[in-house]
Image (spheres, rainbow, N blue to C red):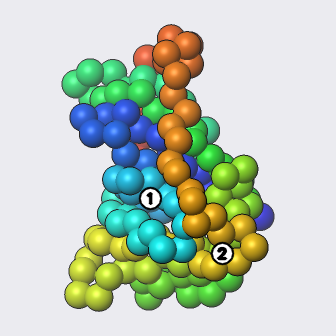
Amino acid sequence: MPRFVVHEHHATHLHFDFRLEMEGVLKSWAVPKGPSMNPKDKRLAIMVDDHALEYGSYEGRIPEGSYGAGAVVIWDKGDYELLRGNVREGRMELLLKGKKLKGTFALARMSGKEKEWLLIKKRDEFAEDGFQMKTVLTPSLLKKLTTKVPPCEAS
Ligand code: MN
């Protein structure tokens, strides 16, 4: 079963990185507001470079001067199933089995756009209309993070 991970990334601007194990790499999208369990939220997801699979377990502080400098922690992770579509056609339906993200989601490229996608929860028994994003990084967790350069991007 392939895995997904959502990184909470405290860079210049806090954002979330949604990553799917697919075709031997982590297909990755930067989601400024983070994923939502509310089907009414349409979350902008900007496709970024593929990352190496090893990056999926990365937590740490990306050092100053490196790309994405700042703290990275795992916000959620789990198995997923690709229910339909594929990344090339720019339209996927995913079944996520995380601790926070559960059930079906649509991830689709906006028409006429290259990198801009939308991540939207589909209505099912897991949908939460009152969903509020809560970050996981606390001062004590921040202290535990070591400074290390993350595994390089997949080439
Ligand atoms: Mn990031």
Of all residues, the one furthest to the front in this rendering is: 130
Figure check: 83 above or below 135 = below
Give the distance between the C-alpha atoms of the residues marked 2 and 1, in whole angstroms. 18 Å
User: Which part of the image, by quadrant, shows the C terminus?
Assistant: bottom left
Residue 140 tag number:
none
Q: Residues within 10 Å of mark 1 (few under 14, many from 20)?
A: many
Residue 104 tag number:
2
Residue drawn at point x = 38 percent, y = 53 percent: 33
Q: Residues within 10 Å of mark 2 (few under 14, many from 20)?
A: many
Q: Is mark 2 within 8 Å of ligand 1?
A: no
Figure check: 152 above or below 108 = above
Q: Is residue 92 left or right of residue 152?
A: right
User: Which part of the image, by quadrant, shows the N terminus?
Assistant: bottom right
Residue drawn at point x = 42 percent, y = 27 percent: 71
Residue drawn at point x = 53 percent, y = 41 percent: 134
Residue holding disc 1: 28
